[in-house]
């Protein structure tokens, strides 16, 4: 089956849909059993059939199966947010006294979890240059149990050489988790590149309409049971209406991503030639460091990227942002709408690498609007920036 046929058909077994196109939304805590034999049977099959609401319903089984198929894994656990999926995946594979390696451009809340929660539990984190590739070997210690990747990285968009890193990890028996939210399973398949667990903030492109919070972690055969049982012990499950929205969003993921990609590239190319812009940070641009690795490993690019201004005071950037018509400020990207955020002090988010840029960085999520309107909005924004700079 090819990709688009798969996203139409996956997770739609008759056991769950009863022949209706979409699986129904089951609101459930208690599952009732008539006989002791029925109860015992349910206990034995509790991961694939009805046992207790937290363990899953046909609605969540449908989404978990769909994401498992799309990522090419052995199973999928669902969580109430992307961050919960990140943290539960890490927790499933670390113990007191362990050391872990985390990419320096990781999503900032992931970093907070390592610096505060893991530290409190006696797990030490070392951050590394996202472009380290097989240089990661020199950072592995006797007690290193896990490498956490995110490619491209949050805000600064560095692409990582995932196959080079997983090759070294395998040699030392270290697990690798990758946050695959930017690419979604359609544009990058981490498990095929040696990653053990692929994490999705389904809140972003999978839900796709900015109306639900949801996370997922998909593991390979060797690691799924450990991921699932640890997540279950922590009490994680996902709400049925949100799971339904993810199943619904998934069906149009490819057509939406293609449009996000096209619109984002149109805007990125326009930004490249603008007098206010120092450089554009988008993995699909030929001059972006890591572009070759992106071209080798990914099947596409999506709507999120950033660019650095040649200069710009906080006052000037505020004048630019406050007057935007289509780009509004907001954190959770991946919906149909365009977003903009400014970062003035990126240095504080980076400890293993030395971020230096002539001006502030602006991160854009390019939505499904007509790119001509978005360019006009940005163009007027640059005019305000320049007026305030004089
Ligand atoms: C948004 C995001 C998350 C967290 O997802 P939430 O659903 O907002 O908790 C994790 N990783 C990345 C890369 C993200 O962009």
Image (spheres, rainbow, N blue to C red):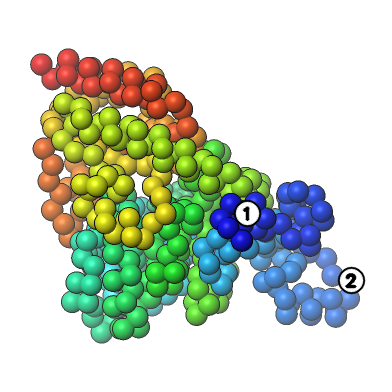
Question: Residue 122 placed where, x, y %?
Answer: 31, 73
Query: In the figure, is residue 314 to the left or right of 371?
Result: left
* Quadrant position of the C terminus in the picture: top left
Q: Residue furthest right?
A: 34
User: Residue 37 location, x and y as percent?
Assistant: 85, 80
User: In the figure, 294 relative to 328: above or below?
Assistant: below
Q: What residue is rendered at 39% in x and 69% in y?
A: 193
Which residue is more in the foreground, 12 or 91? 12
If you read the primary sequence from the N terminus, does the residue marked by circle 2 or circle 1 appear first? 1
Residue at the spot of label 2: 34
Q: Please name the residue that numbered disc 1 is placed on.
A: 5
Q: Nearer the viewer, mark 2 or mark 1?
A: 1
Q: Check disc 2 and report its element: helix, strand or loop.
A: loop
Q: Residues within 10 Å of mark 1 (few under 14, many from 20)?
A: few
Disc 2 to disc 1: CB gap under 8 Å: no
Residue drawn at (61%, 47%) of the image: 251
- Location of residue 290 by image quarter: bottom left
Is the shortest distance between ligand 1 and the CB of mark 1 under 8 Å? Answer: no
In x, y percent, where is residue 253? 54, 46
Q: Is residue 314 above or below residue 129?
A: above
- Horizontal side of residue 219 vs 52, given as left or right: left
Residue drawn 26% across the image and 56% down it = 292
Tell me if residue 95 can be seen.
yes
- Cα distance, mark 2 to mark 1? 40 Å
Q: Which quadrant of the view contains residue 385?
A: top left
- What crowding class fits label 2: few (fewer than 14 Cα within 10 Å), some (14-19), or many (20 or more)? few
Given residues 45 and 285, the one toward you in this image is 285
Query: For the residue labelled by badge 1, is the local secondary structure a helix, a strand or a loop?
Result: helix
On the question of residue 111 being in view, the answer is no
Name which quarter of the figure residue 236 lies in: bottom right
Instruction: Give coordinates of residue 376: x percent, y percent.
Output: 33, 19
């Amino acid at each position: 089956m090819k990709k688009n046929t798969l996203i139409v058909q996956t997770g739609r077994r008759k056991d769950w849909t009863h022949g209706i196109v979409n699986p129904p939304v089951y609101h459930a805590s208690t599952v009732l059993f008539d006989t002791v034999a029925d109860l015992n049977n349910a206990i034995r099959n509790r991961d694939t059939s009805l046992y207790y609401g937290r363990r899953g319903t046909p609605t969540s089984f449908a989404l978990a199966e769909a994401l498992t198929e799309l990522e090419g894994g052995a199973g999928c656990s669902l969580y109430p947010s992307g961050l919960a999926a990140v943290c539960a995946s890490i927790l499933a594979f670390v113990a007191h006294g362990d050391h872990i390696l985390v990419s320096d451009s990781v999503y900032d809340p992931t970093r907070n979890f390592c610096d505060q929660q893991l530290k409190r539990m006696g797990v030490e984190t070392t951050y590394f240059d996202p472009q380290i590739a097989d240089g990661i070997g020199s950072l592995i210690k006797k007690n290193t149990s896990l490498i956490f990747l995110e490619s491209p990285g949050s805000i600064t968009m560095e692409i990582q050489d995932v196959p080079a890193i997983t090759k070294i990890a395998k040699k030392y028996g270290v697990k690798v988790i990758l946050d695959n939210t930017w690419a979604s399973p359609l544009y990058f398949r981490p498990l095929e590149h040696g990653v053990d667990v692929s994490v999705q903030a389904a809140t972003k492109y999978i839900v796709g309409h900015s109306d639900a919070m949801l996370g997922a972690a998909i593991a390979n055969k060797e690691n799924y049971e450990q991921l699932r049982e640890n997540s279950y012990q922590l009490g994680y499950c996902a709400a049925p209406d949100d799971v339904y929205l993810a199943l619904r969003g998934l069906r149009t993921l490819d057509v939406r991503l293609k449009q996000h990609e096209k619109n984002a590239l149109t805007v990125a190319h326009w930004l490249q030639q603008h007098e206010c812009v120092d450089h554009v940070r988008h993995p699909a641009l030929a001059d972006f460091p890591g572009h070759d690795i992106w071209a080798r490993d990914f099947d596409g690019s999506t709507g999120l990227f950033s660019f650095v201004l040649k200069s710009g005071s906080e006052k000037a950037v505020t004048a630019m942002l406050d007057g935007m018509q289509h780009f509004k400020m907001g954190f959770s990207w991946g919906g149909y709408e365009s977003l903009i955020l400014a970062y003035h002090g990126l240095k504080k988010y980076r400890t293993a690498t030395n971020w230096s840029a002539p001006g502030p960085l602006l991160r854009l999520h390019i939505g499904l609007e007509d790119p001509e309107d978005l360019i006009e909005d940005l163009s007027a924004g640059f005019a305000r920036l320049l007026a305030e700079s004089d």
